Amino acid sequence: MTVKIYVPRDAAALSLGAEKVAMAITQEIAARGLDATVVRNGSRGMFWLEPLVEVEVSGKRIGYGPVKAKDVVGLFDAGLIDGGAHALCLGEVEDLPFLKGQTRLTFARCGITDPLSLDDYEAHGGLAGLRRAVSMQPADVVREVTDSGLRGRGGAGFPTGIKWKTVLDAAGSRKYIVCNADEGDSGTFADRMIMEGDPFVLIEGMAIAGLATGATKGFVYTRSEYPHAIATMTQAVEIARKAGILGASVLGSGKEFDMEIRTGAGAYVCGEETALLNSLEGKRGIVRAKPPLPAHKGLFNCPTVINNVISLASVPVIMDKGAAFYRDFGMGRSRGTIPLQIAGNVKYGGLYETAFGLSLGDIVDKIGGGTVSGRPVKAVQVGGPLGAYFPRALFDTPFDYEAFAAKDGLIGHAGLVVFDDTADMLKQARFAMEFCAVESCGKCTPCRIGSTRGVETADKIAQGIEPEKNRELLADLCNTMKFGSLCALGGFTPYPVMSAMTHFPDDFAPVPLIEAAE
């Protein structure tokens, strides 16, 4: 029986040399005349172990990592294809603590299957949700998603079922499903991992959304910085279309849904849904005033569902297992699972899917293992570059939309960036304003002008120029931006700035003259 050796094709693994490892393994198989084949899977999300090589032995996956091309000959000498002992051997991959503690629903297949094999996808539960959906009435599909408690995983946390029902009930001969895959937040990579490691789950989720709302066309809008994701998704769409999963009759149901991949230039503001729609229509990516909502007048002025990748990729398991199964996970109004993306100065960086409710401290200290530098954790920014900085005093906060909002924070796209005690929070606050100034579409004054004035004010504080007066001015600018901006770019920039000022006041204090002279 042919032995399968898995080497990730995920962008993170490729950046660490996975392509060279795959080539070395292929050459070694040929040179030794072995009955083995290389399968290019997605990543398991344990980036400190990438490239992670796995070999299937007696139905179990034995892992080796991190593997370099120069290690390959030694691995084969040690009996790689039989799961032989070696210094890089990690044992059975499923038993690794980082994986064992997870609840993988959305990422159940990521790192396990060949991303472009429909047979693999179906063998691991794929298409069961879509098959159920085609046999149901649209309103019943919408009700199932609503009852599951699924909320938008792109950051806003808006109930997915309510958005779908609005589009289902909207009048219009043409409706659209738009997948917002413009993942631009620092420390986030869940969307990319799904598109590269399990593209059919996103396709299935979009097809279900189309059937549920009466939409016959879908678009995945992603960024040019994701060439591997774009290539994989494009191939997957073609495979799905040939297999009858997409097209004029989805799974032979007589119901139409097709989709295509569109690539944006990577402007951060195009992660905002109305700017994304403008870009998708070939216009400049600037924010639209609301109302009208995209659910009423969206793409090409038609009713449009706009969901994040993880939102749509979570739908197939809901339709397969049922709303109650999914709703059973989580806490409060935050139901189901969330893919935490742990990054920054952290020992075990990667993707960790779990039910809502873990404390921030458990995520950073137990799962992330603390800082890689070995120094104390000073702050964790949750929710991308516009997320608040949480100090250790807030590490008892459960990972939940409402719990974070109560502490003046936001979950966003569930990216966590860890900083040790060498971080200068005034510089971090300045960076937030600078980021907003660079990425602003320029349509509204609070965002366009406020962010520029914010950079100038932060610089004055750093220079010791009227620090108290300028701290008050910076807080006033944040208030104006928060309540006066048209979209979340300007509206959320105050979160990192105000949290840095509130929780780390010493970093905003004037520099003593003696110290400045030195």
Image: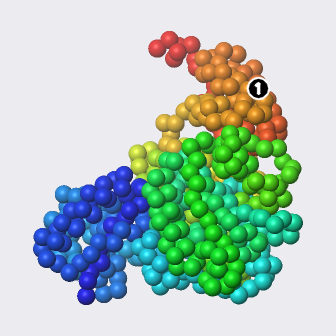
At horizontal 41% and vertical 55% (from top left) the residue drawn is 12
Based on the displayed image, in which of its 4 quarters is residue 89 positioned? Answer: bottom left
Task: Identify the residue at image location x=76%, y=60%.
Answer: 304
Which residue position is annotated with label 1? 472
Tell me how the rendering is colored: rainbow
- Callout 1: SS: helix
Compared with 342, 77 (above or below) is below
Q: Nearer the viewer, residue 460 or 17?
A: 17
Asked whether the viewer can see residue 402, the reply is: yes
Residue 415, position in %: x, y? 58, 53
Q: Quadrant of residue 164?
A: bottom right
* Residue at 25%, 65% in the rendered image: 88
**Is 172 or 265 nearer to us in this picture?**
172
Q: Is residue 127 left or right of residue 282?
A: left
- Quarter the N terminus occupies: bottom left
Establish if 446 lies above or below 326.
above
- Across and down, in percent, residue 472 comes to 76, 26
Three-letter code, disc 1? Glu
Q: Is residue 276 left or right of residue 229?
A: right
